[in-house]
Amino acid sequence: MAQDLTGASRRGLLRAGGLTAAGLALGAAGAPGYPAPAETDIGGVQDGRVRYPNWRGEAEPPPPPAPNPLPPGERVGYAIIGLGRISVEEVLPAFGEARMSRPVALVTGSPEKGRAVARRYGIPESAVHSYQELEKLKENPAVGAVYIGLPNAMHREYTERSAAIGKHVLCEKPMANTPEEAAAMVAACARARVRLMIAYRCQYEPFNREAIRIVRSGELGRLRSIEATNVQSSGTADQWRFDRALAGGGALPDIGLYCLNATRYLTGEEPEDVFARLYSPSGDARWKEVEESVSFMLRFPSGVIANCLTSYDSFNDKSMRLHFEKGTVEMPDAFAYRGQQMYVAQRRGGVAVREQKRIEPKNQFAQELDHFAECVRENRQPHTPGEEGAQDQALIAAIYRSAAEGRPVQTPKPPGPTRGPEPAQGG
């Protein structure tokens, strides 16, 4: 049917799709022996990118543009430091959805695991190193940045070592175990003139980005309060998260951090004070060194009150609810790796309605990898630099202090801005 369209009809479709013959270098006429395809079907190349006119009718939404990844040789190469669950189960697979990033080296304490992972991602065995050999990454020009997926206590050492050999650093959250460690990491990267970004994946996730937009737009009136919950059921005590020396704490720095950071990026403010309560049942080896549960309330300059709950021994819930003057935003699985949703309740035409907001999901890990890759390529500050992580470390210390003293405590203010430019829409 498309081959029978007249030239005028084709030109109309091209204009409807936002493309013109002048701006589009059309493709070949088609395969020999077959009818010549229409311009609508073959598209063309514009500014080095394959583009197609919109083929759908007015009743259908236009299709998204074709993917436009960088050629592999132009992508920022990452060395993955640490092959624990988050690296193997989430970060490495995310490179398959990334447009500007690729894995090129591994640093691990397990040669066997390193070889197995390298085979699956096309990484040469010569680019698999032990922790003691990290400095060999300096000799690999394919490595532009490192991703640090190690236990919290190791973040400072491996950030400083990576910065010292001139590699940009994407470090998992929480940034460190103490504010002092976080400050040292920021200083080390500044001295080495490399970029430091903390992997706050939710700040690059589309539903959380939409929540930020709703708050800033004022379309539901002023934000009045936030409820943020991140709880999960933990297993046996023989894991690093229950070791204070490695983890720095329990539920609060690991998963409660998502609630804390969300209150800051949603309001765009820093809290004035915090009041916290901590609970750990006796007789359970898991809570010998770290806390099970923490509840904390933050008060912000605009009057927003945030109530946050985190626990290592509750049925999984990673939700957030935002209360505005004129509506409510509910976000089930706001802090989960996938499966985000958003419901907006408001009064419309004299009737209270609750509607689900449809947003195209994107891989959060691919989004943050590509954002940092873009910052490395363009030599600019990432959206969640070390200063963002350092401020959360200072606030975590204040939360622990409030719980220990049983009273509200004033929260520290950062010496300067904690966030860089907003991430590009869609990555």
Image: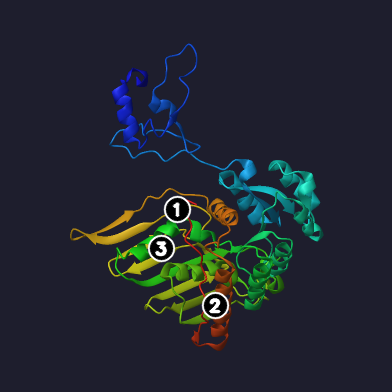
Mark 3 closeness class: few <14, some 14–19, many ≥20 residues within 10 Å: some
Q: Is residue 37 visible?
A: yes
> For the residues marked 2 and 3, what is the alpha-carbon distance in whole angstroms?
21 Å
In the image shown, does 70 or 154 lie closer to the viewer? 70
Q: Is residue 3 above or below residue 255?
A: above
Q: In the image, what residue type sits under mark 2?
A: Leu
From the image, tell me which residue sits under label 2: 395
Q: Earlier in the sequence, mark 2 or mark 1?
A: 2
Q: Is residue 370 above or below residue 405?
A: above
Q: Secondary structure at mark 3?
A: helix
Task: Tell me the residue at 55%/73% (across/down).
Answer: 392
Q: Secondary structure at mark 1?
A: loop
Q: Whole-percent x and y of residue 147?
A: 65, 57
Q: In the image, what residue type sits under mark 3?
A: Ile
Q: Extreme front residue here?
A: 22
Q: State left or right for residue 8 relative to residue 143.
A: left
From the image, tell me which residue sits under label 1: 425
Task: Tell me the residue at 46%/67% (across/down).
Answer: 265
Q: Earlier in the sequence, mark 2 or mark 3?
A: 3
Q: Quadrant of the N terminus?
A: top left
Which image quadrant for residue 24? top left
Q: In the image, what residue type sits under mark 1?
A: Gln
Q: Extreme left residue here?
A: 350
From the image, tell me which residue sits under label 3: 212
Task: Tell whether label 1 touches label 2 (CB within 8 Å).
Answer: no
Q: Earlier in the sequence, mark 3 or mark 1?
A: 3
Nearer to us: label 2 or label 1? 1
Task: Tell me the residue at 46%/51% (across/down).
Answer: 426
Q: State left or right for residue 390 relative to residue 322.
A: right
Q: Is residue 56 visible?
A: no
